[in-house]
């Protein structure tokens, strides 16, 4: 159904989707060349919210740069915190206490669920269903309240410190999180009934927005986009960091390659994150959250270092080139949606506008993270 | 044979005429990050790095004309391109371009390919013919460092404004 | 003659008031309903339970600047909102609210309503074309193909009812459904046609078609806000937008009036005329029925995601039209037999 006609190259017009368009959820602009309602090609124009975070890294000391991480991906800020902390700890050889590692995992996974909830609500909103958005934001509010109580902020977290954390969690947080897990499991069942099984939704997603394995490899797609194409790739498993190897969880993979496969992967990921949080809370050891001995001034020895973490959207890589000074010589941020969005042009050709926007939603774009 | 060995062997084809250089590079693996500090520029070759301290496994330095072949070898071995970025070594009058590769399967092996070009006239061949996704990464590197990728289909500013003629990540850039 | 004219003018005046009040308070109902489905209270600030919200919204709309973008086709641009509102108002003239509350009982009332409904589709086309905006353009093309696709099953279903009743007069159609709820056209058992299983299906078809005709979710492809920004009324501000808005709600009311009259026995009491006040045939039953149907409209809108244009057209051309045609033939045959 998505490619019924041969598109006429010379009978096209250009439709500007964005930079202000309800479906792009941010300042993304896509110049679509259309033949009627069919897309002939789509050129993405980035940079509307480009802030040159990489140059900022060269002008700030390492701890000063930590808050920038929350400004990259505002929905999954905790994982970005983790990536940056990881690369600096790797470079300086700082040991992280076990309790801190567990708390890191708990907060990152809570943040992952809240990010997926925003995606779910916004995605169904893209498809024209308004109500799930409200349910999702209601659930997300619980997470924000929990995280606010330990990190002090609701969105752009700056919670991690090199070697540890800003703050220890308290019993209130633990009981609150346990209550949230029970609540969220119920809610996920409700979403499965309300959204996942909806016939209109299934018809709109199944068979649309096909991304195969080869395309993933050529573009370097990661995260739920790659897992929705049958690639069993998750940095938490493939390149274990923190205490993830000690926790028992599955990586949902779906061979569908279409928008619905990516949808199912994200829904299942929320369940797995709940499992991770539950286990981490059970195993949470006593002890300090900051290392006893930590260099006063963070000055990684010269050389280059790499660290990757799994954010809600995929593989966030961070390359640090140090010349031994107190600022980074070069810091490269490899953001997941940058690669995921890149394949949009190739995959959307011949699709109807409505399907293409549904496909764009299934990539789960966060524009500040793409533009950096 | 682990994927790391396979990759070294496959990439070894690039250095067959300079086997001695490669041997020299292998020895340097012990010292790891000390390479950059030495006064002499690093020879082309492969260095095996310690993953725990560096975060990647293979550190490959090649020349610009070997780049397309090297990425082809990695593509056939199942690597995907994570990112392309530059580093401005202003003291050495050189621009380094780093290509990060990783794998989808559980044979963990991260490969970094480094190419150095003169700072005044940085030209590299494009690898969009091998990795379609290199398109945006190369445009970004062009934006930030002014590296010109010959043969790139659409080398216009991506993240910077359309009419940008400056390259903000160069060390001598003044805002 | 002069009396009839006076009648019509009066009726239009009352209709404007009715439609205005309805549109305003249907918005309130819609927002309260949405709030109910979404675990939130909805408008609460102005008046008791937000009851003053609609007039305040109205004042806001009227006092806003009427912006006419450069490059639009001015005449067409200005005409479109009027075209959206006007047919809806005229249609009220022929609708019988009870056996004596009707502005002007036209013998071809059904035809009048459909003729003006087609004009409503026209307003979307004109608005989209006049706006000179690509999104509006796509939207208006969609809206027209949607209107064409759904007018056909709507008409065929109505013809089925007209054949059973033998009249195009809306009042007459109700008159035949006054013997309790079993005599309503929605049931398969009917004294004219014997046993016709497809009647409830026809009712559903009519319902789906009126959702589509009024551009309501899940068929709101004309204004699909996540694809086409706001569709045909992207460029409209102030009361231009307000008229479209009121036109939409007026159309909902007309759609549910039509469903009530054709299938649910109009103003008839479901238990037959018992002679004691609420249980007589009166306008209260009519209003109750149309507001129940409107409630279902709202319910559907806040529950389902939007379909796509080809899904919508497929539904009409592949399912609704063949089924309604089949029902038309079946009814004709049954009428001949009984």
Image: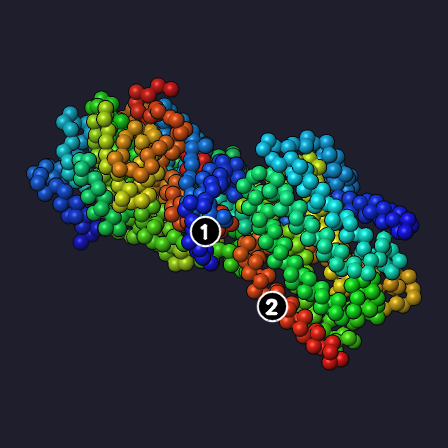
Q: Is residue A107 left or right of residue B46?
A: right
Question: Is any part of residue A254 visible from this angle?
Answer: no
From the viewer's perspective, is residue B68 above or below residue A162?
below
The answer, for residue B167, to whether it is visible in the render is: yes
Residue located at (16% from left, 31% from top): B42
**Rendered residue at 21%/31% (across/down):** B116
Which residue is disc 2 drawn over?
Answer: C322
Query: Relative to the observer, which residue lies in front, C144 or C135?
Result: C144
Give x and y (percent) for residue B24.
Answer: 10, 37
Q: Residue furthest bottom?
A: C337
Pair 1/2: label in front = 2
Identify the disc placed on residue A351.
1
Closest to the observer, B61 or C150: C150
Does dot 1 land on a helix, a strand or a loop? loop
Asked where in the image residue A145 lies, by quadrant, the reply is: top right
Other-residue count near label 1 (Cα within 10 Å), few / some / many at <14 / 14–19 / ≥20: many
Say which chain tag 2 marks: C
Q: Position of residue A42 (x, y in %)?
A: 42, 43
Find out whether the residues at labels 1 and 2 contact each other: C-beta distance under 8 Å. no
Identify the residue shown where x is 42% and y is 36%: A45
Q: CA distance from mark 1 to mark 2?
A: 28 Å
Q: Residue at 14% of width from left, 44% of height from top?
A: B12
């Amino acid at each position: 159904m998505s490619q019924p006609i041969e598109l006429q190259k010379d009978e096209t017009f250009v439709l500007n989707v964005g930079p202000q368009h309800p479906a792009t959820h941010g300042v993304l602009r896509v110049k679509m060349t259309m033949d009627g309602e069919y897309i002939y090609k789509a050129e993405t124009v980035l940079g509307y919210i480009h802030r040159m975070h990489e140059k900022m890294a060269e002008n700030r000391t390492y701890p000063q740069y930590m808050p920038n991480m929350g400004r990259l991906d505002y929905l999954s800020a905790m994982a970005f915190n983790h990536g940056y902390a990881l690369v600096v700890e790797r470079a300086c050889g700082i040991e992280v206490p076990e309790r801190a590692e567990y708390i890191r995992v708990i907060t990152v996974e809570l943040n992952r669920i809240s990010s997926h909830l925003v995606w779910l609500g916004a995605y169904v909103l893209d498809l024209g269903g308004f109500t799930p958005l409200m349910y999702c934001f209601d659930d997300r509010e619980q997470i924000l309240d929990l995280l606010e109580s330990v990190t002090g902020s609701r969105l752009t977290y700056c919670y991690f410190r090199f070697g540890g954390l800003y703050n220890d969690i308290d019993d209130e947080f633990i009981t609150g999180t346990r209550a949230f897990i029970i609540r969220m499991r119920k809610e996920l069942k409700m979403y499965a009934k309300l959204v996942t099984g909806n016939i209109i939704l299934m018809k709109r997603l199944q068979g649309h927005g096909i991304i195969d394995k080869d395309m993933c490899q050529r573009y370097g797609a990661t995260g739920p986009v790659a897992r929705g194409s049958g690639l069993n790739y998750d940095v938490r498993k493939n390149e274990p960091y923190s205490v993830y190897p000690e926790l028992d969880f599955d990586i949902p993979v779906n061979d569908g390659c279409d928008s619905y496969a990516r949808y199912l992967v994200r829904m299942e990921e929320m369940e797995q994150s709940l499992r991770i949080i539950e286990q981490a809370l059970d195993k949470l050891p006593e002890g300090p959250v900051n290392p006893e001995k930590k260099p006063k001034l963070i000055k990684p020895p010269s050389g280059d270092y790499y660290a990757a973490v799994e954010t809600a959207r995929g593989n966030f890589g961070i390359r640090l080139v140090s010349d031994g000074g107190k600022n980074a010589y070069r810091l490269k941020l490899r953001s997941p949606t940058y690669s995921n969005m890149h394949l949009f042009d190739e995959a959307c050709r011949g699709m109807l506008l409505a399907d293409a926007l549904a496909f764009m939603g299934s990539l789960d774009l966060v524009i500040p993270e793409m533009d950096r | 044979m682990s994927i790391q060995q396979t990759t070294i062997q496959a990439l070894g084809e690039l250095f067959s005429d300079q086997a001695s250089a490669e041997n020299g590079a292998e020895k340097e693996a012990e010292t790891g990050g000390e390479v950059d500090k030495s006064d002499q520029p690093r020879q082309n070759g492969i260095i095996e790095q310690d993953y725990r301290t560096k975060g990647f496994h293979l550190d490959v330095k090649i020349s610009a004309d070997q780049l397309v072949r090297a990425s082809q070898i990695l593509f056939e071995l199942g690597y995907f391109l994570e990112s392309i970025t530059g580093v401005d070594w202003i003291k050495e009058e050189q621009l380094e371009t780093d290509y990060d590769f990783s794998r989808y399967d559980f044979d963990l092996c991260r490969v970094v390919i480094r190419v150095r070009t003169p700072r005044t006239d940085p030209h590299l061949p494009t690898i969009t013919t091998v990795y379609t996704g290199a398109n945006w990464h190369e445009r970004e590197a062009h934006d930030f460092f002014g590296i010109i990728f010959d043969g790139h289909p659409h080398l216009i500013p991506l993240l910077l404004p359309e009419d940008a003629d400056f390259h903000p990540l160069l060390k001598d850039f003044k805002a | 003659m002069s009396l009839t004219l006076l009648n019509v003018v009066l009726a239009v005046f009352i209709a404007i008031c009715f439609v205005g009040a309805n549109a305003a308070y249907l918005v309130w109902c819609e927002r309260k309903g949405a709030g109910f489905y979404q675990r939130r209270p909805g408008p609460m600030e102005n008046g008791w339970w937000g009851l003053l919200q609609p007039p305040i919204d109205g004042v806001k709309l009227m006092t806003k600047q009427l912006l006419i973008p450069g490059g639009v086709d001015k005449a067409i641009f200005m005409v479109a909102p009027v075209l959206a509102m006007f047919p809806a108002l005229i249609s009220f003239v022929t609708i019988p609210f009870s056996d004596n509350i009707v502005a002007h009982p036209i013998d071809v009332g059904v035809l009048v309503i459909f003729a003006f409904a087609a004009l409503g589709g026209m307003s979307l086309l004109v608005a989209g074309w006049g706006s000179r905006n690509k999104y509006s353009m796509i939207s208006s093309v969609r809206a027209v193909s949607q209107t064409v696709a759904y007018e056909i099953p709507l008409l065929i279903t109505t013809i089925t009812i007209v054949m059973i009743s033998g009249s195009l007069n809306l009042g007459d159609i109700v008159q035949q459904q006054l013997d309790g709820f079993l005599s309503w056209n929605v049931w398969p058992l009917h004294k004219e046609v014997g046993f016709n299983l497809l009647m409830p299906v026809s009712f559903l078809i009519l319902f789906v078609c009126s959702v589509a005709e009024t551009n309501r979710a899940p068929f709101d492809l004309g204004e699909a806000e996540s694809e086409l920004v706001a569709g045909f009324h992207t460029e409209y501000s102030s009361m231009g937008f307000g008229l479209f808005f009121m036109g939409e709600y007026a159309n909902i009311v007309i759609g549910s009036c039509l469903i009530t009259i054709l299938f649910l026995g109009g103003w008839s009491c479901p238990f037959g005329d018992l002679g004691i006040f609420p249980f007589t045939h009166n306008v209260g039953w009519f209003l109750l029925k149309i507001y129940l149907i409107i409630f279902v409209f709202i319910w559907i809108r806040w529950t389902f995601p939007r379909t796509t244009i080809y899904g919508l057209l497929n539904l009409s051309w592949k399912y609704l039209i063949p089924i309604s045609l089949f029902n038309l033939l079946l009814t004709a045959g049954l009428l001949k037999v009984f």
